[in-house]
Amino acid sequence: MSRKRVIIVGGGYAGVQALRTLAPSGECDIVLIDQHPYHYLQTEAYELIANECSMTRVMIDLVALCLSYGNHVTYIKDTIREVDYEAKRIIGNISGHSYDYMLLCTGSRTAYNGGTEGLREHSHGVKTLQSALSFKQQFEQRLYERMESEGGWCSEPFNIVIGGGGLSGVEIAAEMAHYIRIFHKDNTLTCDNIHIFLIIPHETVLEGMEEYLIKQATKRLIQLDVKIINHSRITSVQEHALMLNGTDAICFDFMIFTGGIVASTLTAGMKVAKNKKSQLITDEYMRVVECEGVFAAGDIAELHDPEGKLVPPTAQGAEASGLSAAKNILALIQGKPMIPSDVRLKGMMIALGGGYASVSLLGWMRFSGVAGYAIKTIIMRGYHYLLHRQCAKGLEHMPKKQAKCRMGF
Ligand SMILES: Cc1cc2nc3c(=O)[nH]c(=O)nc-3n(C[C@H](O)[C@H](O)[C@H](O)COP(=O)(O)OP(=O)(O)OC[C@H]3O[C@@H](n4cnc5c(N)ncnc54)[C@H](O)[C@@H]3O)c2cc1C
C-alpha cells in the first residue's frame, strides 16, 4: 500500500501541534504549507510591541522544524487560495498539491465590523508579525518626531486608541501603558502627555470571561491610567479621528483595532457549512464533513468542548483541536477508530503590563500580579523552548551554509 500524503495548511498553533503529533510516527508523508517561513507567536505580540522582547522571541522557524523530523516532512512556502476537494487538490499562488488527507489551520483575521468607514485604512492590527512590527516602528518614530519638534516636551496630548476589550485589546492596552510609564520614568526627555483609550462595546472588558479575571484586569488598567470607554461602538474613522456611537469624536495619533475575528479568507470559496464568522463547521472528529479527507482546526473552525459548548478562539483551543485532528488522521491511516475531539480551555492567562498578569487555571487556581506573570512566562517560554529545541535538531540536517545563516552567524 502506498504511503499516504497529508497536507497541513497553516503553521500556527494548530498546524504546528498537528505536525508535532503526526511527524514522529513516520507513517505518512507530511507537507506543511504556510505563506510565511515562521510560526508567529501571537500570544506574545504585546511584549514585542511594548519592546519587552525581540522579534526572535515571537517566531519559530518552520523550515528547521520540518527538517528536524526527517525526510518524510517537507515545508513549502506558498499562499493557498483554493481547495478543490473533489479532486483532493489545493491550489496556491506558486503550485498545486494533491493530498490523501488535509488539515486546514489557516487561522483567522481581524473582523472590521461590517465595513465601518475608514477603520481598516486608519488602524493598525497585530494579527501578523508584519503588522505588529510596522505598528511598533511607526509608533516609536512618531513619538520621536513629536519630542524633537516640541523641544523634548509633548505639550500636545499624544493619544493611542485601542478598539476592542477582548484578550488581545486588554493585553496590548496594559503593556503599552506600562511601556509609556517606563519611557517617562527612564527618559531624560519629558513626555507625560500620552493617553491610552480602550474602547469597548460592552459594560466591562473581557466580556463573557470569569468574573475574577474581569475584576483584576479592570483594576490594573485603571491603575495604569488606561481610560476605558464602555458601551461604545466605533462608527467611523478618519486619519487621526474617530466617531463613537455616531456622536462623540476622539482624536488619536495611533489606533489599534482588535475587535473580533473572522475565519481566514480561504473559507470564502468553500461551499460547506460555516457560521457567521465564516468559520468551518466540523464534526466531533474535526472533519469538514462535506469534503472527504479534509479536517480543520484552530481559529478557522468553530470549536466546541465535549459538552457542546462553544470554545472561544484561543491558542489553547487551536492546539487542542490540532492535536485531535492529527490523532484522527493518524487513526485513519492506521485503520483504527477515530476518537471525538477533546477541546477545552484549562485556564486563562492575561498579561497586564510590567511583569503583572492574572491567571485562572482549572477553575480553582487563581493568581494575580507577579506570581501570575511568573506562571504565564513559564508556560509561554516552555512552549517556545520545546519548539526551539526541536528546530535545533533540524538545523543539523541543513546544508552547512544555510544553517549558519539561520543561526545568525
Ligand atoms: C495580540 C494577541 C494576543 C493573543 N493572546 C492570546 C493569549 O494570551 N492566549 C490565547 O490562548 N490566545 C491568544 N490569542 C489568540 C491566538 O493567538 C489565536 O487564537 C491563535 O493564534 C489561533 O491559532 P491558529 O493556529 O488557528 O492560527 P494562527 O496562529 O493565526 O496560524 C495560522 C497560520 O496560517 C497561515 N496562513 C493563513 N492563511 C494562509 C494561506 N492562505 N496559505 C498559507 N498559509 C496561510 C498563517 O501564515 C499562519 O502561520 C491572541 C491573539 C492576538 C492577536
Image (cartoon, rainbow, N blue to C red):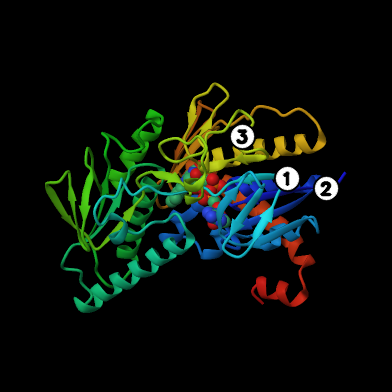
Foreground residue among 193 and 29: 29
Q: Position of residue 80 (x, y in %)?
A: 57, 56
Quarter of the picture holding the C terminus:
bottom right
**What is the C-alpha distance between the residues marked 2 and 3?**
22 Å
Check disc 2 and report its element: helix, strand or loop.
loop
The residue wearing badge 1 is: 100
Q: Is residue 40 visible?
A: no
Mark 1 packing: few (<14 Cα in 10 Å), some, or many (20+)? some
Q: Quadrant of residue 37?
A: bottom right
Foreground residue among 261 and 288: 288
Check disc 1 and report its element: helix, strand or loop.
loop
Q: Which amino acid type is marked by label 3?
A: Met
Quarter of the picture holding the N terminus:
top right
Question: Label for residue 309?
Answer: none
In the rendered image of this protein, does residue 229 appear above or below residue 64? above
The residue wearing badge 2 is: 3
Q: Position of residue 288 (x, y in %)?
A: 59, 36
Q: Is residue 251 visible?
A: yes
The residue wearing badge 3 is: 286
Q: Residue at x 33, y 73 (%)?
A: 141
Counting residues from the start of the chain, the first of labels 1 and 2 encountered is 2
Mark 2 packing: few (<14 Cα in 10 Å), some, or many (20+)? few
